[in-house]
Structure formats: C-alpha cells, structure tokens
C-alpha cells in the first residue's frame, strides 16, 4: 500500500492507496509545533480504526507547502513506518515542463494538481484549488506548466471581515437564497459567496483569454463543490485530485506499489 500525504497550511490530508484504489483518507489539523511522535500516535490511532497495520504501508510520498513541517514528516515516515519518503518538488519527474520563474517557487500542491489534471482530463487545462489560498494553475496543450494566480482563500477573506468589523457576526459560508440580503446574515453570506464566485470567474475568464485555447477547468479543495455551482467556467469538481496526483508522481518516480 502507498501512503500519500498532502501537508497544507491549514490541514494535513493522509490517504492510503491499494494499487490505484483510494481506500481511506483522513484530514488532521496542521500544527508545525507538534513533534513526529505526536503525529505518529495520531496516525496510529487512525490506522487502527481503519484496520490497517503500519507494516502494510510499502511507500510514502509527500507534498508539503509548510517547510517547517518537512523534518517532522520525514521523521514520522522513518521512525513509525521505517520508510524513506519521497518529497515532491520542482525537481521531481512529473512529465510536466515548469515554465514558472524560478521553478522552485511553485508549491508542491500546485505541481501535484497539475499532474493529476493532465492525466485525468487532458491538456490544456486550468486547475482551481480552493485551499488556505485559492490557486489557479494553467497547463497548455504541450503539458507545460505556465503559472497562474494566487488569491486569498475564501476562509481568509471572510475571517478578515469578521475580525475587522466589530458589529458583523461570523456566518456560515453557503449559497444564499437571493443576492439581495434582507438581514445582516443574508447580506454577509451573499457578499462572501457571490463576491468570491465573481473573483473566481473573473480570473478564469482572463486566464482563458490569455491561453488562447479552450482549456478544461477543474476545481478541487474543500470548498470547490460550493463555489463551482456559481461558476460559468468550472466543468469538473474533483475532491481527490491532489491525492491522485501524489500517487501518479510516486509511480512515475519509484514504480507501482502493491503488485505481486
């Protein structure tokens, strides 16, 4: 079995593949101050609940955008799984040519998303990842990673509003029944939802024009299903895109896992 780890600024997603089948996944809070032992104990509990033994894991691949967490994740892999993990970065063999300058500035999650999108949906394409930041990633027909856009995530944007406006309450982020809110809660939900949907489609419209072709647009990340319903351009929502990309990159670099 293959353990894939997507370490983001807000959450760490762990998932287990048996060959190409995703059999289980978990999401835990990112806490860079925690030790590898603390993460190890938490991982052991999750594995036990899923009925999986650590010894069944044959390989580990990690995409991390939290540099201070990398040593901890490496120790977790080496001490608890007795494996040397593969960290994905701009030097990994992905099949993509990275045109970003410098290539080292491209987040591992953006690379992984691009690899999975090309493999599953073809190129040209644009991947919108709704994470702590919302990233837009453009890949042309030659499978070249062109770059993209980085915007504040919807949670960051809404938290800034709640924090800086004393009389405004925290509200659930959801699609309101109408644009014109008849209450403070409704008005805020409309502003957050429709305002962010407008940002997404505004960016996508300009990216599509610049690419000069009709790329397929794929969304991933926690809030992708919500925002995609308001988008004119998002065609697919793929919640497991990053996890699939990690599996594909591992197989390209180290070979398939779990075959007799």
Image: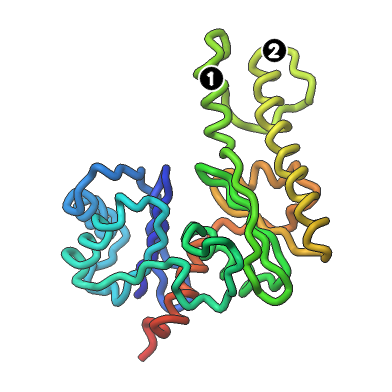
**Residue 218, x across and y down, in percent:** 67, 58
| One can see residue 84 in this view | yes
**Residue 258, x across and y down, in percent:** 37, 82
Give the CA distance from mark 1 to mark 2: 16 Å
- Residue closest to the far bottom: 260
| Rendered view: 75 above or below 167 | below
Q: Residue at x 66, y 74 (%)?
A: 143
Q: Is residue 30 left or right of residue 81?
A: right
Mark 1 or mark 2: which comes first in sequence? 1
Q: Which residue is mark 1?
A: 162
Given residues 103 and 156, the one toward you in this image is 103
Given residues 201 and 49, the one toward you in this image is 201
Q: Is residue 20 left or right of residue 143?
A: left
Q: Secondary structure at mark 1?
A: helix
Q: Is residue 200 left or right of residue 96?
A: right
Q: Is residue 57 left or right of residue 89?
A: left
Circles 1 and 2: CB distance less than 8 Å? no
Q: Nearer the viewer, mark 1 or mark 2?
A: 1
| One can see residue 241 in this view | no
Q: Residue at x 57, y 21 (%)?
A: 161
Q: Residues within 10 Å of mark 2 (few under 14, many from 20)?
A: few
Q: Which residue is mark 2?
A: 183
């Amino acid at each position: 079995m293959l353990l894939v780890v997507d370490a983001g600024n807000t959450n760490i997603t762990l998932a287990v593949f048996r060959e190409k089948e995703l059999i289980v996944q978990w999401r835990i809070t990112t806490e860079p101050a925690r030790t590898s032992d603390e993460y190890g104990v938490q991982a052991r509990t999750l594995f036990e609940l899923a009925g999986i033994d650590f010894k069944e894991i044959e390989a580990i691949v990690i995409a991390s955008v939290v540099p201070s967490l990398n040593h901890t994740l490496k120790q977790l892999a080496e001490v608890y799984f007795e494996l040397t993990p593969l960290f994905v970065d701009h030097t990994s063999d992905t099949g993509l040519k990275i045109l970003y300058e410098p290539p080292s500035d491209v987040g591992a999650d953006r690379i992984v998303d691009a690899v999975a999108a090309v493999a599953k949906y073809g190129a040209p394409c644009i991947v919108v990842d709704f994470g702590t930041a919302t990233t837009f990633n453009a890949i042309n027909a030659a499978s070249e990673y062109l770059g993209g856009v980085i915007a504040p995530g919807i949670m960051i944007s809404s938290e800034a509003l709640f924090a800086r406006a004393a009389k405004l309450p925290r509200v659930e982020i959801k699609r309101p029944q109408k644009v014109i809110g008849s209450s403070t809660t409704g008005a805020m939900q409309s502003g957050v939802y429709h305002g962010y949907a407008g940002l997404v489609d505004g960016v996508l419209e300009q990216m599509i024009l610049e690419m000069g072709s009709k790329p397929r647009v794929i969304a991933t990340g926690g809030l992708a299903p919500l925002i995609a319903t308001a988008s004119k351009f998002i065609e697919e929502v793929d919640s497991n895109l990053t996890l699939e990309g990690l599996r594909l990159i591992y197989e390209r670099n180290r070979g398939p896992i779990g075959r007799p």
